[in-house]
Image (cartoon, rainbow, N blue to C red):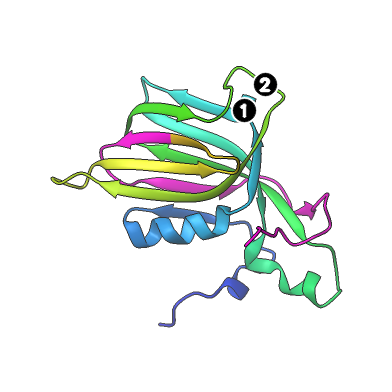
Amino acid sequence: MNDAKFEDGGEQPLRLIATDEQDLQVLATLTQDAVFPTNEVKWDAKRRQFALLINRFRWEDRSGAEAGQRAYERVQSLLVINDVTKVSSQGFDRGDKELVLSLLSIDFTPDQEGPSGEMTLVLAGDGAIRCTVDCIEVILKDVTRPYAAPSRRLPRHPE
């Protein structure tokens, strides 16, 4: 059996789960540069679940756009973090329902006892959302068909 490659995704919607730090890095790569408004951030303390509805850049299928065959694409996806015991944020106004945030990375810092720890969603502009978790269980699921990225460009970051 061969390892999966980005190209294997093609037009298929993603449905992935991360249960360890390596898996989480794959999801972090796929969600880099996702954008979402603050009103699409939900924490259900009773169910111990934190969820975001994100507009994810389709890193796994950018070759068609680079070849000039179509526009760069985004897709709406659910990013769900399970077994969350606490959520905190910094660097943005959670009450501003018009604010659009950009996800740069997802980091995990395990506790000494493990597998619990802190999962941090690092946002552009020095913002962050920190979830205290009992273990790594993160789900990424595309929920719409891909659409042309409004910017029509590949996301770039200042060096």
Do residues under tags 2 and 1 come within 8 Å of each other at their CB atoms?
A: yes
From what the image shows, is residue 75 above or below residue 69? above
Magenta-drawn stretch contains 131:
yes
Q: Position of residue 9 (x, y in %)?
A: 61, 68
Q: Earlier in the sequence, mark 2 or mark 1?
A: 1
Magenta-drawn stretch contains 39:
no
Q: Position of residue 25 (x, y in %)?
A: 43, 59
Spatial separation of the CA atoms under disc 2 and disc 1: 5 Å
At a point 73% along the width and 51% down the height, the residue shown is 145
From what the image shows, is residue 110 above or below residue 14? above
| Span of residues in magenta | 130-159
Q: Which of the 4 image quarters holds residue 38?
A: top right
Q: Is residue 46 left or right of residue 116?
A: right
At a point 66% along the width and 42% down the height, the residue shown is 35
For disc 1, the neighbor class at 10 Å (few under 14, some 14 to 19, many from 20) is: some
Q: Judge by depth and name the residue closer to the eye, 45 or 127.
A: 127
Q: Kindly state the secondary structure of the residue where label 2 is placed.
A: loop
Q: Quadrant of the C terminus?
A: bottom right
Q: Circle 2 sits on which residue? A: 97
Q: Judge by depth and name the residue closer to the eye, 149 or 93.
A: 93
User: The residue under label 2 is which amino acid type?
Assistant: Lys
From what the image shows, is residue 97 above or below residue 40? above
Q: Position of residue 153 (x, y in %)?
A: 80, 60
Q: Position of residue 68 (x, y in %)?
A: 86, 74
Residue at the front extreme of this rendering? 159
Residue at the left extreme of this rendering? 113
Q: Is residue 152 left or right of residue 135?
A: right
At a point 21% along the width and 47% down the height, the residue shown is 115
Q: Circle 1 sits on which residue? A: 38
